[in-house]
């Protein structure tokens, strides 16, 4: 009797598990979108500093604060779209140089802007000059058998601290890899990979789900 009961349970579970596995990619997609939405809400929502600025734009046209926020978003999207048209027409370098000249003179702000500009341009395929020397690497935080992480090697330049050589890498965040942490890792603990920068970012965006398809062979040898 117990065997019959177990067999019936297995038969019921099989289609249920098949259904779960079928819908799981959609659920993960929704979770990622919800996470990104929550992140944007924190920084762009009506009650955030940026949100209040957007609402202020809309208040130039209407008095209702909720409607003003919506109109402000439309205005901002229109301005970004117009900027994109200027960039496509060849004004990209002129705009970037103007912003750099304006902000670089401001203490702290200039450094933050310059670093952000380099990071964004690194992810832009249309800027191949900024990608030179940058590559995906594997960092292991122990002599052997320790925890490892995929990171972006900023450049092959080595830095010396306490008579030991280090490489500068950026560890992206998931699932929004434009942020992350900058680490100085001992040279012998940084290994090259066959991954492209885009593939590395793809792994982080998918929160590791695409790693099985992207990673094919383990890295070998220290980075140079």
Image (cartoon, rainbow, N blue to C red):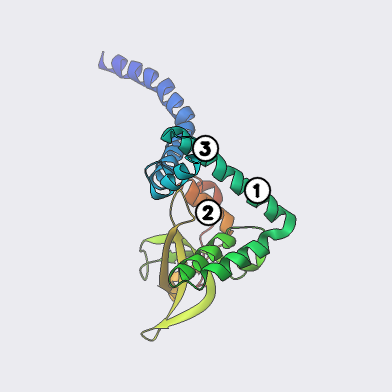
In this picture, residue 83 sits left or right of residue 210: right
Residue 100 image point, x, y percent: 57, 68
Q: Name the residue under label 3.
A: 61
Secondary structure under badge 1?
helix
Which one is nearer the viewer's eye here, 61 or 41?
61
Q: Mark 2 points at which residue?
A: 201
Q: Are marks 1 and 2 in contact (CB under 8 Å)?
A: no
Image quarter of residue 140: bottom left
Please rate how many residues cluster around mark 1, counting C-alpha atoms within 10 Å: few if below 14, some from 14 to 19, many from 20: few
Q: Can residue 29 be seen in this view?
A: no
Please rate how many residues cluster around mark 3, counting C-alpha atoms within 10 Å: few if below 14, some from 14 to 19, many from 20: few
Q: Mark 1 points at which residue?
A: 82
Residue at 67% over, 60% down = 92
> In the image as oriented, which residue stretches furthest toward the top?
1
In this rendering, the answer to whether 108 lies above or below 9 is below
Please rate how many residues cluster around mark 2, counting C-alpha atoms within 10 Å: few if below 14, some from 14 to 19, many from 20: many
> In the image as oriented, which residue stretches furthest toward the left?
2
Residue 81 image point, x, y percent: 63, 46
Q: Can residue 106 be seen in this view?
A: yes
In this rendering, the answer to whether 82 lies above or below 157 is above
Q: In which quarter of the image is the N terminus?
A: top left
- Give how far apart the Cα atoms at labels 1 and 2 are: 28 Å
Which one is nearer the viewer's eye here, 171 or 221?
171
Residue 155 image point, x, y percent: 54, 72
In this picture, residue 98 sits left or right of residue 30: right
């Amino acid at each position: 009797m117990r065997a019959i009961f177990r067999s019936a349970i297995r038969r019921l579970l099989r289609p249920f598990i098949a259904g779960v596995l079928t819908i799981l990619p959609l659920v993960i997609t929704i979770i990622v979108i919800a996470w990104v939405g929550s992140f944007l809400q924190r920084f762009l929502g009506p009650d955030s500093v940026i949100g209040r600025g957007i609402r202020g734009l809309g208040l130039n046209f209407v008095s209702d604060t909720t409607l003003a926020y919506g109109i402000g978003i439309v205005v901002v999207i229109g301005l970004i779209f117009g900027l994109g048209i200027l960039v496509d027409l060849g004004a990209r370098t002129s705009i970037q140089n103007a912003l750099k000249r304006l902000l670089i003179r401001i203490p702290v702000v200039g450094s933050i802007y310059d670093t952000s500009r380099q990071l964004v341009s690194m992810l832009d395929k249309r800027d191949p000059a900024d990608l030179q020397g940058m590559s995906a690497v594997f960092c292991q935080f122990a002599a052997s058998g320790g925890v490892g992480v995929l990171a972006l090697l900023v450049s092959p330049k080595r830095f010396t601290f306490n008579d030991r050589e280090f490489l500068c890498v950026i560890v992206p965040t998931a699932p929004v890899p434009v942020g992350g942490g900058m680490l100085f890792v001992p040279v012998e603990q940084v290994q090259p990979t066959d991954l492209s920068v885009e593939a590395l970012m793809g792994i982080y965006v998918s929160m590791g789900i695409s790693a099985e398809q992207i990673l094919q062979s383990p890295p070998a040898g220290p980075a140079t």
